[in-house]
Amino acid sequence: MNVQTFFATLWQDYLAIAPQASAIRQLFLQTDVEVINDHVAFRTFAECPLDLTALQPVVLGMGYKVQEDYQFIEKKVRARSYIHPDPKVPKIFLSELERHKLSNKAQAILARYCAQIEMTLLTPAIFWSGRHWDMPSLQDYQTLLAESEYAAWLVTIGLRVNHFTVSINHLTSSQDIRALLQRVEDAGFTINSSGGRVKGSPECLLEQGSTMAERMEVTFAGGEKHSVPTCFYEFAKRYPDANGVLYQGFVSANADKIFESTAAM
């Protein structure tokens, strides 16, 4: 599968549970010829057949190169970013929950679901495959949510894109991230204010902001219906380094707060 087909299919799967992204993209297309995606992100569990190590060959098989590793100690998450030689192809950010760092109770819950994952030949379609385990019970979801929003989100949503990201650098109407966030908010969408509306600064070469995740009613294993967060839309503004080269990496402190776009409000 080539990267163009991959992202076209991924975008459609994303819109199925985050229709706000389509509306926001159309908002920008009123003033801009095109909307370029800076990166996409995925969440998974460590130490399972779908962990970062297992998924990496799929990403590399689409022409990507490993970019950098990241650690989020408080969230018990590690991540790795990948970059494509074509600058218009979005970067990929893969993260995994380090299950062994959670409480014994949370580990036991996740072990039951991860044990259901079957070993299989992985293809790019794995990134819109959803859950590889049974729908959790509401009790399991709430127990995990009290300890790790990441775990609760993942056990419910499964392996699907967590967010797409608008490249502000490619917009022609305005490259002011604060004005952009205000424009999105004025259109009726909630902005993630954790750590401030804008995460990062020109000094760290990256500014980011995002909406709060869409919400969707799901039916848990016991038949209970409950609204859970799905996916969000992010916006990134990159700055040139001392050599005049546009920064292409990620900033852990920024990403830590972007993770909270899927917080269960």
Image (tube, rainbow, N blue to C red):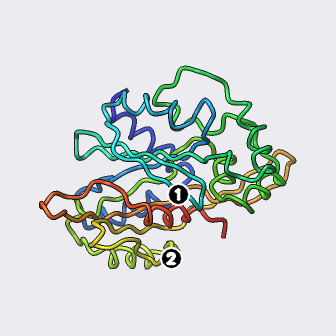
Q: Nearer the viewer, residue 195 or 133?
A: 195
In this view, 125 is above or below 34: above
Tell me the quadrant of the picture where the C terminus can be found.
bottom right
Among the two numbered marks 2 and 1 on one chain, the one whose residue lies closer to the N terminus:
1
Q: Quadrant of residue 183?
A: bottom left
Counting from the top left corner in percent of width and height, residue 162 is at: 52, 51
| Residue in view at x 48 percent, y 48 percent | 79
Q: Looking at the picture, which amino acid does disc 1 mark?
A: Phe
Counting from the top left corner in percent of width and height, residue 209 is at: 41, 69
| Residue in view at x 23 percent, y 62 percent | 169
The label shown at residue 193 is: 2
Counting from the top left corner in percent of width and height, residue 163 is at: 47, 54
Q: Quadrant of residue 109?
A: top right
Tell me: 190 left or right of 130.
left
Tell me the quadrant of the picture where the N terminus can be found.
top left
In this view, 158 is above or below 230: above
Tell me: 169 left or right of 265.
left
In this view, 195 is above or below 64: below
Q: Which residue is mark 1?
A: 72
Q: Nearer the viewer, residue 75 or 101?
A: 101
Q: Looking at the picture, which amino acid does disc 2 mark?
A: Ser
